[in-house]
Image (cartoon, rainbow, N blue to C red):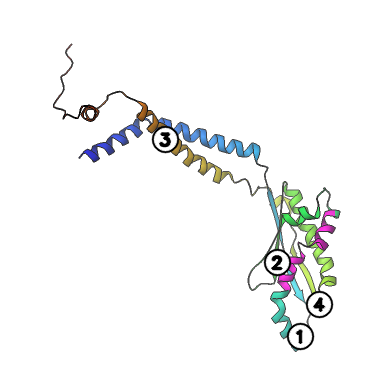
Amino acid sequence: MNQIADIRHVLDILKNKFYIIVICISLCIATIDGATYMLVKPTYKASTEVLIEQSQGNENQRVQDDQTSTQLLNTYLVIIKSASITESVSQNLTFEITPKQVSSSLTVENASGSKIISIIAKADSPQKATEIVNKTTEELKTKAPTILKNSSVVVLEKAKSENNLTPVSPNFKTTTVLGFFAGIFTGVFMIYLSQLLNARIRRKEDIEELSQYPFLGKVSQVK
């Protein structure tokens, strides 16, 4: 019974002080989202896909091509971020960026069993991300036949900046959820701390705990 009474007492306290939790949630969400907005620069992403093709030869050559397609794709994954491509890309962009920065902004992916490579670029504006990824595919298409014989690159679709206007980071949904749970924790902690520091006697259980004697009854106030 004492445990049930204690649980009810805790729930009553939380119910009466619930406004503190609401205020803490609002403040934490506003603080975290505001700090993220002011301190974290938005990052935009643009992507395109290219198809890697091999020149057709005789039957033996086709069998060999099938056996080496995986090695060819893996080689292209490395070439796309290599200096031979990124140096040309950095020189042909309308904004200043080093080849190393071009390489670090690129992500190259290949779905298993597919000859299609996804090229993804991230930058601080959708225009820059789009320009990086499109210039990279152009350089790859131009230099691929000279780097790897009997192979070519087909650009399936060019990236467009109007399709990439939403930043991929920061993610305000994540920061809002983080602020929500931080607010709950802060609110509950503040309520607990206020109860811990409050020395007033409010319940008969408080009298029993302090005096070590059972509570027998109370005298009504006489006016």
Numbered circle sitting on residue 189: 3
Q: Give the range drawn in magenta.
A: 72-90
The residue indicated by pointer 2 is 117
Left or right: 89 as drawn, with respect to 170: right
Q: Quadrant of residue 21?
A: top left
**Label whose residue precedes the other's in the sequence (2 or 3):** 2
The residue indicated by pointer 1 is 61
For the residues carrying marks 3 and 4, which lies nearer the camera in this image?
3
Residue at 78% of width from left, 69% of height from top? 153
Are there few (<14), some (14-19), or many (20+) residues within 10 Å of tag 3? few
Q: Which residue lies furthest to the top in this view?
A: 223
Percent position of residue 124, x then y: 72, 46
Are there few (<14), some (14-19), or many (20+) residues within 10 Å of tag 1? few
Q: Is the magenta stretch mostly helix, strand or loop?
A: helix
Vertical arrangement, residue 173 with respect to residue 28, above or below: below
* Mark 2–mark 4 distance (CA, rounded to whole Å): 18 Å
At label 4, the amino acid type is Asn
| SS for dot 2 | strand
Percent position of residue 206, x then y: 25, 28
Number of disc labels = 4
Percent position of residue 52, x then y: 74, 71
* Mark 1–mark 2 distance (CA, rounded to whole Å): 23 Å
